[in-house]
Image (spheres, rainbow, N blue to C red):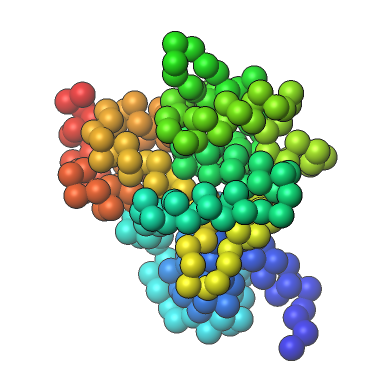
């Protein structure tokens, strides 16, 4: 069935969100919670009327049932397991060309190893990978900027790429960097069989944050590393970590103690 101009525009924006999050569009359209997550994450600048239009359009296209409009904190994506990460690294290193391997591996290294958001990865440059006294840190440009330590496989990948490239580490020849497709196209290319784990920026960031929560990183320090403005933002991720505070009140209380 041919779509009208408005429906096609809404659907295209939703498809970009799904590509970034590693979701199948047909399944995501039928899931009311995913629709609400899209509206909260990708449409925060829209007015209330436009949000309502997007919501009704996506429900009509996907047949999603009604759900409370508030985006529940329980919807934070689950972190990857060690087995999942091994599969993603293997798939990244099996891409068809050296350029695609570099793009796929820098995504994993920066998003899992440093918790970077897609646009932050797109603007990561070789001089932003800092090495000192055996430590590797990534400088994330922004206001404010931040320094994020990277360990393990991610650190070695970023160091190697920084030594090869003089400028941007991810898709260095791209002329436009502030587009969701810049990351989404590479993430989507790693999706194989529907039963296989897929590369999702949301799950990568969740893996980074949950690892720090599990290792008892001070909450205010973790917020600074992740570019979060308040400790309450960690509530979405803490549900995956049994040892972490499970409510916003508990998060605030722990943050005050440390």
Q: Quadrant of residue 168?
A: top right
Q: Is residue 72 left or right of residue 190?
A: left
Q: Is residue 127 visible?
A: yes
How many numbered dots are placed on residues in this image? 0
Q: Quadrant of residue 233?
A: top left
Residue 136 drawn at (x, y percent): 48, 22
Q: Residue at x 23, y 30 (%)?
A: 255
- Quadrant in the picture for the C terminus: top left
Q: Tell me if residue 18 comes above or below residue 137 in the rendering.
A: below
Q: Is residue 134 left or right of residue 256?
A: right
Nearest the viewer among 31 and 161 is: 161
Residue 100 drawn at (x, y percent): 70, 48
Residue 198 drawn at (x, y percent): 52, 61
Q: Residue at x 53, y 52 (%)?
A: 90
Residue 38 drawn at (x, y percent): 53, 61
Q: Residue at x 34, y 26 (%)?
A: 221
Q: Tell me if residue 199 comes above or below residue 12 in the rendering.
A: above
Q: Tell me if residue 150 comes above or below residue 31 in the rendering.
A: above
The residue furthest bottom is 1
Q: Is residue 25 left or right of residue 229?
A: right
Q: Is residue 143 visible?
A: no
Q: Tell me if residue 9 comes above or below residue 98 in the rendering.
A: below
Q: Residue at x 28, y 30 (%)?
A: 217
- Quadrant in the picture for the N terminus: bottom right
């Amino acid at each position: 069935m041919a779509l009208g101009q408005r429906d096609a525009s809404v659907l295209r924006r939703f498809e970009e969100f799904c590509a970034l999050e590693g979701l199948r569009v047909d399944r995501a359209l039928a899931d009311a919670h995913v629709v609400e997550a899209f509206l909260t994450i990708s449409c925060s600048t829209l007015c209330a009327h436009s949000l309502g239009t997007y919501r009704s359009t996506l429900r009509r296209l996907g047949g999603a049932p009604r759900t409370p409009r508030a985006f529940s904190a329980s919807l934070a994506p689950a972190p990857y397991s060690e087995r999942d990460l091994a599969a993603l690294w293997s798939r990244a290193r099996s891409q068809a060309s050296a350029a695609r391997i570099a793009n796929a591996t820098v995504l994993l290294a920066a998003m899992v190893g440093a918790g970077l958001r897609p646009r932050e990865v797109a603007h990561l440059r070789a001089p932003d990978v800092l090495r000192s006294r055996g430590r590797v840190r990534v400088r994330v440009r922004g206001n404010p900027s931040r320094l994020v330590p990277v360990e393990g496989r991610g650190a070695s990948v970023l160091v190697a790429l920084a030594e090869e490239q003089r400028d941007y580490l991810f898709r260095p020849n791209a002329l436009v960097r502030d587009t969701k497709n810049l990351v989404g196209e590479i993430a989507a290319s790693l999706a194989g069989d529907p039963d296989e784990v897929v590369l999702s920026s949301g799950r990568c960031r969740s893996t980074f944050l949950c690892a720090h929560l599990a290792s008892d990183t001070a909450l205010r320090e973790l917020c600074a590393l992740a570019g979060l403005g308040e400790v309450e933002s960690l509530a979405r991720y803490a549900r995956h970590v049994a040892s972490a505070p499970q409510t916003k009140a508990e998060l605030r209380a722990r943050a005050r103690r440390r």
